[in-house]
Image (cartoon, grey):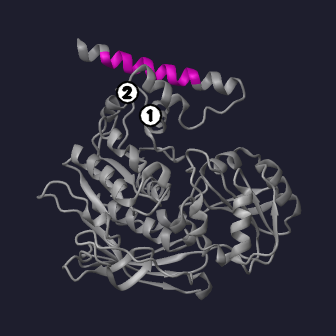
Amino acid sequence: MNFIIKLIRFYILLVIARLIKIAINMRGQSSGTSFIGMIMLKISPNFLRYTSNYIKKEQIAVTGTNGKTTTAGMLSHILEYQGNKVIHNEKGANMLSGIANTMALSIYPFKRFDYSVLESDEAYLSKLYDFIETDYLIVTNLFRDQLDRYGELNTTAKKIQEAIDKNPDLKLILNADDPIVVNFKTKDDIKPVFFGFDSITFMNKNIESKAPMELFNCTKCGNVLKYTKRFYAQQGHYYCDCGYKRPECDYTANAKIYKDYSILNITHGDKEFEFKTYLAGVYNAYNVLAAIALSMELGYEDLQDAIYNYKSIFGRCETRTIKGHKTLIQLIKNPTGASEVLKTVDLESDILIVINDNYADGRDVSWLWDADFELLKDSKKRIITSGSRAYDMATRLKYAGVENIKVIPNIHTAMHTITREAEGNITILPTYTALLEINKIKR
């Protein structure tokens, strides 16, 4: 009887969620990506606990500093391409309220899904695992990110391990090239699945950064790590005199990185595969490899069509037409990710950089000085800076050697200006809340 009552309450919550959405839409407003989920959790703090009953096969979580949205998006796309029904928080709302929002508006009383693919903020993964036990967890990487929210890397790593400890039966899919990520573990008898690159070749030399690599310390003894190969940030083939080193990979890849696409040759066991992806940059090569690794763990190998046809969403290497201009939107939020994005920027395009310092962006914008904005110094056209920290961004560009800069703090005005004055393609580099505002602007 108690189970029946709980089930009825859950169904009522689903009805309430849809009624709220209808009411908001009738007012001509957007319900956003978290508002309804926030209400569900206020009414029933255990709302997420009941959602697992609607997943027939596996539940998957994706976390890490960079690449969560793209990795989860591609994985969801691959699974749907194989004929599966998938629940996925595709807009990147990755805290509890965002995940609850997705569940509330996706689940129907008598409908079951094959998989759930849930992107989770690193700091909220432990809270998510209080309610949902996933079968797999992908950890993409760990970089310095929003120090005012997360603290140093060891703090973030500790939060993720605490989440894993709550769900010890899950299978970890780990980036072997990241010397922090490889340390995550579950039960001793459950071996993690490692993915990584044997080589990365830049086919256009101008997309390689000339910025010096930072020193990175061994997580075991504290001495500086040594590298036989280093791809970006701390990613690469590392080792230490204490014996700590990169593990052997279950999925090993060689990548050729072109300006607009990449070719990945992947070895798994005695099988070899070749994939072409139109997601640009080495950072996206890692995202694609992570999605492929888990897809193959689930038994899917015929993946090329899904990968070839995948289009990134919501500012992650997203292409859209705005006011007649082909526009590439790429989220930037920390020095490592921004530097990799800057390698791919078309210097012939009109460029708009929008920097906010709201809570979701991180209040501390000192990371602008660590990102490789020197890559923009040969931009052929004027660069517009906007957002609440538009002047900070303009100052950073000035020190990077950029001469033609215009500051327009108001985002709508900046968007109107660049779309009116641009003669060709546009590149927009926003932080997270700036991306949300840009996404509301009519195309």
Q: Secondary structure at mark 2?
A: helix
Q: Residue at x 28, y 15 (%)?
A: 4
Q: Residue at x 88, y 63 (%)?
A: 421
Checking the image for residue 47, the label placed there is 2
Q: Position of residue 177 (x, y in %)?
A: 34, 73
Residue 176 visible to the viewer = yes
Asked whether residue 52 is drawn in magenta, I would say no
* Left or right, residue 257 beside residue 167: right
* Rendered position, 263 above or below 336: below
Whether residues under marks 1 and 2 lie with C-beta atoms below 8 angstroms apart, the answer is yes
- Assign the magenta stretch its main secondary structure: helix
* Picture quadrant of residue 13: top left
Q: CA distance from mark 1 to mark 2?
A: 8 Å
Q: Residue at x 75, y 75 (%)?
A: 402
* Left or right, residue 64 beside residue 389: left
Q: In which quadrant will I find the N terminus?
A: top left
Q: In the orientation shown, which residue stands out farthest toward the left?
A: 189
Residue holding disc 1: 100
Residue 332 visible to the viewer = no
Q: Which one is in front, 407 or 329?
A: 407
Q: Position of residue 98 (x, y in %)?
A: 48, 38
- In the rendered structure, which amino acid carries the disc numbered 1? Ala
Q: Position of residue 171 (x, y in %)?
A: 24, 55
